[in-house]
Structure formats: structure tokens, C-alpha cells
Image (cartoon, helix red, strand yellow):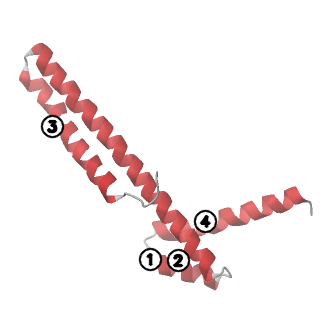
Amino acid sequence: MTTEQTIDTDQALADAVYEFASERLLAGNSDEEIVKSMVERGLDREAGQLIVANLNLARQKGFWAEGLRNMLYGALLTTGGAVVIALNRDFYPAWGPIIYGAIQFCIGATQVAMNQTSDKI
């Protein structure tokens, strides 16, 4: 077996292990249950814990990014509604985007606050 084939095989194995763990995580299994099931299939405990920790960090970063996106869209909607009110002096059509944008901004701020990580994202 050549070095390139070995690397491909190792990558395929790593992908399969991460896919197995992510499926269990999405199914609602606890971290300990996932690690236990990987140990039962021949992976050592430390590697299983590292894989679960990496998946949790990736999920947390995804929620954090989604929160930032919600904050941006909320701020844009609120600002757009305020501009419409300022330019047209017609208050009623612009209140919808202002209220919706403020709610979306608050949801995003909550997502960001709840998903801060210890390392820089």
C-alpha cells in the first residue's frame, strides 16, 4: 500500500468515526453515551472524548455564527424601518420591520451570549 493510499484510508476512517459520533449527537445521545459506544467499537476513550469535544465546539461555533447573522439582519431591518419613517413620515408601514428586526436582533444577541467559547472564534 502506498503512502497516498494509507492517507486516503486514514481520512476515510476518521470521516466515518466523526460521522458516527455526529449522528449520535444529533439523535440526542449524551456525550458519555457517544464515547461509550465508540469505545465499544474499538476506539480508545481519550480519542472518543476528543472527537465529542470537537463536535460540540463546532456546533457551538455554528450557533454563534447564526446569532451574529440574526443580529445583523435584525439591525438592518430596524434601521431600514427607521429610515422609511424618517423619510416618509408615514409611521404605520415601517413599524413591522422595526419590531421584527428588534426581536431578531435580541434573539441573535441571546444566541451569541449563550454560545461564547473559551477560545477565539
Residue 23 visible at all? no
Q: Quadrant of the N terminus?
A: bottom right
Residue 58 visible at all? yes
* Secondary structure found at label 1: loop
* Secondary structure found at label 4: helix
In the image, 121: left or right of 92?
right
Question: Label 4: which residue?
Answer: 18
Q: Earlier in the sequence, mark 3 or mark 2?
A: 2
Question: Label 2: which residue?
Answer: 34
* Placement of 63 over or under 71, stated as above or below: below
Residue drawn at point x = 51 percent, y = 71 percent: 24
How crowded is the residue under tag 1: few (<14 C-alpha within 10 Å), some, or many (20+)? few
* Secondary structure found at label 3: helix
Are discs 3 and 4 less than 8 Å apart at CB?
no
Q: Earlier in the sequence, mark 3 or mark 1?
A: 1
In front of the other: 54 or 17: 54
Residue drawn at point x = 27 percent, y = 30 percent: 76
**CA gap, disc 2 and disc 1:** 6 Å
Q: Quadrant of residue 73?
A: top left
How crowded is the residue under tag 2: few (<14 C-alpha within 10 Å), some, or many (20+)? many
**CA gap, disc 4 and disc 1:** 15 Å
Question: Label 1: which residue?
Answer: 30
